[in-house]
């Protein structure tokens, strides 16, 4: 029982980090119907900003998060304006291929020696690790930080989407962007904002990931990006609570497979779950079927 | 588009018409080095490059080998098997090298060895310990050699050490299923440990890109092993060690030569303190060859040579010795001379090639104490 509870905690830690990345995929998809493959690499940039601000400038943790958020937001808005906006009315496949191009560009450009360099860097822990024992279960302060920061981010996101004018714009554009434009919503601004918001969460995720698994390199965004994307599809892409749910399921299934079966099946089982869910409900667990617009 | 095509055709034609660049001028022998200068094991690659250069400089200062100056060509393989294969291709077909030193890890050296074998270029690796480097499907790749002992020896040494010296009865093993080196040593260790009367209570694998080991380590902890064997390179081992400590694992951490990097302590911090690993040499060894080498290296690079660099130095010198003996730049003759090398005095010991192109030599056990490597004991084959 203790063993099970301990594994649940391990799974939660992984799931929460996936959730922060999955949200970016799902929001961008919800609004522009684009699978932004560069998102995992924006997450990587966030981790690197965290690495530099801690290692070089020894900033306090709050400022580290803020720098990562600011850096990723600016980067994502730039990517949107330079790479995706000119293709807004082109066939969807063009944007998708561009997204893959942007992803490869970010990975290889940052691995140049003049940028971050091609090596693995050990991510300094911004605070000493403390382990608490609660009823035979070990919990670290790293897990506590991940939990608190992720929940704060989710509350903040909920506030923006449902309580602000920009959030209403986002919902309107996601429902029908042509009509939203006709109703006076500045569609371009809303889209830029959405990219920025998703990237901000990825930036936070990058720093948390660096703290939890203390090593960064320029290709680190690929696997978590893929897993988070899967989580978003699992939960119902375009649906915000769905992304969180999907990410938590991914985190738990990966952990439980390692815990009770064999870690060899770990990645496989996560994708098997995805396939089963999509067979049973093609829109994902919480995704609503979308009527084809004429 | 049409312009692009014709340009491409032109390039193909031009490249095809320069056979001249393949044949080096007389009185020069071209040797290639393949080593990872970036990526996850770059400290290995840098040590190997330094050592290779020292060996070549020494030989050139004495007027070269067999009356020929040595010209070197260096390629970075980023510790990626595909890159390593490309690197070997580039060296052999573009630069026209007569022999290759490299690569560093087993997973990159195996593709290099296949290519070198098919193109008949004698190749010697200082450090790739997997058996498949010199043998494929039970068949000896007769152009491939190495200066280090193999994984089967290394896995057995650590099992013996865990059973005998540490008195461990239960062991756990975590290995990278996608890495020949890691998988190979894990299997040998498990079999040897069980044969010596121990129990392996957890035997788990992970993927190359995994960074979250909490589930596996919780499982390992529940299996209550006395030792946790981590056959992987320093970056991964560092991450695992750190997380092992955070899951409250108390047993000893042990591993193979992949741990040998100053980066290990940087990544793992005090989580790796007290760990043991098998290595090819220790700078604290008192033999004069070791003392000379350490002094020479320190003067040039302001740091103590690690085992990887030292093995690369031995490998390069073995190759140069073979060229000297063959007294020719012919790859076939160099190969024959390498195969018949015996009683070669290297820094990592005096050794003779066996029929598989593997040397017969001893290992040392090193402990990490106060963040530094401390020489513990020598283990003979």
Image: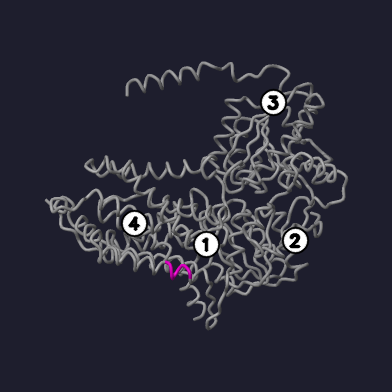
Residue span colored magenta:
A145-149
**Which of the 4 image quadrants contains residue A147?**
bottom left
Q: Which residue is mark 1?
A: A60
Verify CB contact (< 8 Å) between mark 3 and mark 2.
no
Q: Which residue is mark 3?
A: B71
Q: Position of residue A49 (x, y in %)?
A: 49, 52
Alpha carbons under labels 4 and 1: distance apart: 23 Å
Verify CB contact (< 8 Å) between mark 1 and mark 2.
no
Q: Which residue is mark 4?
A: A197
Whether residue A147 appears in magenta in the rendering, the answer is yes
Bin the neighbour count of mark 2 within 10 Å (Cα to Cα): few under 14, some 14-19, many 20 and up.
many
> Closer to the N terminus: mark 4 or mark 1?
1
Per the image, label 1 sits on a secondary structure element best described as loop
Alpha carbons under labels 4 and 3: distance apart: 55 Å
Per the image, label 3 sits on a secondary structure element best described as strand
Q: Are marks 4 and 1 on the same chain?
A: yes
Chain letter belonging to callout 3: B
Of A146 and A136, nearer the camera is A146
Q: Which residue is mark 2?
A: B367
Q: Are marks 4 and 3 on the same chain?
A: no
């Amino acid at each position: 029982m203790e063993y099970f509870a301990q594994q649940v905690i391990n799974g939660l830690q992984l799931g929460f980090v996936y959730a922060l990345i999955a949200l970016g995929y799902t929001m961008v998809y919800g609004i522009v119907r684009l699978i932004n493959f560069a998102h995992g690499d924006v997450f990587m940039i966030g981790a690197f900003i965290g690495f530099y601000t801690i290692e070089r400038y020894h900033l306090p943790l709050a400022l580290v998060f803020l720098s990562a958020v600011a850096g990723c937001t600016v980067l994502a808005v730039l990517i949107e304006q330079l790479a995706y906006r000119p293709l807004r009315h082109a066939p969807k496949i063009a944007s998708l291929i561009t997204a893959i191009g942007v992803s490869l560009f970010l990975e290889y450009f940052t691995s140049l020696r003049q940028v971050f360099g091609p090596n693995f860097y050990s991510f300094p822990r911004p605070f000493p690790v403390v382990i608490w024992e609660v009823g035979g279960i070990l919990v670290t302060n790293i897990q506590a930080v991940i939990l608190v920061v992720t929940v704060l981010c989710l509350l903040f996101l909920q506030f923006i989407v449902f309580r602000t004018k920009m959030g209403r714009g986002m919902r309107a554009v996601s429902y029908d962007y042509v009509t939203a434009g006709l109703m006076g919503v500045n569609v371009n601004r809303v889209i830029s904002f959405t990219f920025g918001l998703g990237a901000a969460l990825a930036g936070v995720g990058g720093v948390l990931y660096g703290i939890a698994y203390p090593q960064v390199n320029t290709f680190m965004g690929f696997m978590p990006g893929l897993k988070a994307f899967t989580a978003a599809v699992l939960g119902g892409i375009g649906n915000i609570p769905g992304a969180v749910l999907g990410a938590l399921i991914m985190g738990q299934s990966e952990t439980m497979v390692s815990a009770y079966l064999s870690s060899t099946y770990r990645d496989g089982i996560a994708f098997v779950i995805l396939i089963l869910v999509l067979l049973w409900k093609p829109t994902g667990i919480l995704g609503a079927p979308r009527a084809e617009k004429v | 588009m049409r312009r692009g095509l014709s340009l491409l055709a032109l390039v193909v034609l031009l490249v095809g018409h320069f056979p001249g660049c393949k044949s080096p001028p007389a009185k020069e022998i071209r040797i290639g080095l393949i080593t990872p200068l970036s990526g996850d094991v770059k400290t290995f690659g840098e040590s190997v490059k330094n050592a290779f250069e020292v060996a070549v400089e020494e030989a050139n200062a004495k007027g070269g080998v067999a009356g020929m100056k040595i010209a070197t060509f260096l390629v970075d393989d980023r510790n990626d098997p595909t890159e390593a294969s490309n690197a070997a291709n580039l060296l052999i077909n573009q630069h026209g090298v007569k022999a290759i030193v490299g690569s560093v890890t087993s997973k990159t050296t195996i593709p290099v060895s296949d290519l070198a074998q098919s193109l008949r270029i004698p190749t010697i690796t200082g450090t790739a310990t997997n058996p498949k480097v010199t043998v494929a499907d039970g068949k000896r790749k007769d152009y491939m050699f190495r200066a280090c002992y193999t994984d089967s020896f290394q896995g057995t040494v650590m099992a013996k050490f865990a059973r005998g010296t540490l008195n461990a009865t239960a062991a756990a093993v975590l290995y990278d299923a996608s890495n020949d080196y890691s998988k190979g040593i894990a299997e040998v260790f498990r079999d040897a440990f069980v044969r010596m009367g121990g129990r392996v209570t957890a035997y788990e694998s992970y993927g190359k890109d995994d960074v979250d080991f909490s589930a596996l380590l919780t499982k390992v902890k529940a299996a209550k092993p006395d030792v946790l064997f981590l056959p992987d390179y320093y970056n991964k081992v560092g991450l695992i060690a750190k997380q092992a400590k955070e899951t409250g694992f108390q047993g000893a951490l042990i591993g193979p030569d992949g741990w040998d990097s100053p980066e290990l302590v940087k990544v793992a911090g005090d989580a790796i303190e007290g760990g043991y690993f098998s290595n090819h040499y220790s700078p604290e060894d008192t033999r004069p060859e070791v003392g000379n080498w350490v002094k020479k290296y320190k003067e040039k690079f302001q740091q103590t040579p690690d085992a990887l660099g030292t093995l690369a130095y031995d490998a390069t010198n073995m190759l140069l010795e073979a060229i000297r003996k063959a007294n020719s730049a012919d790859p076939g003759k160099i190969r024959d001379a390498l195969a018949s090398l015996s009683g070669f005095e290297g820094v990592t010991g005096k050794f003779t090639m066996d029929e598989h192109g593997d040397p017969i030599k001893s290992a040392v056990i090193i402990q990490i104490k106060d963040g530094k490597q401390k020489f513990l004991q020598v283990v003979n084959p």
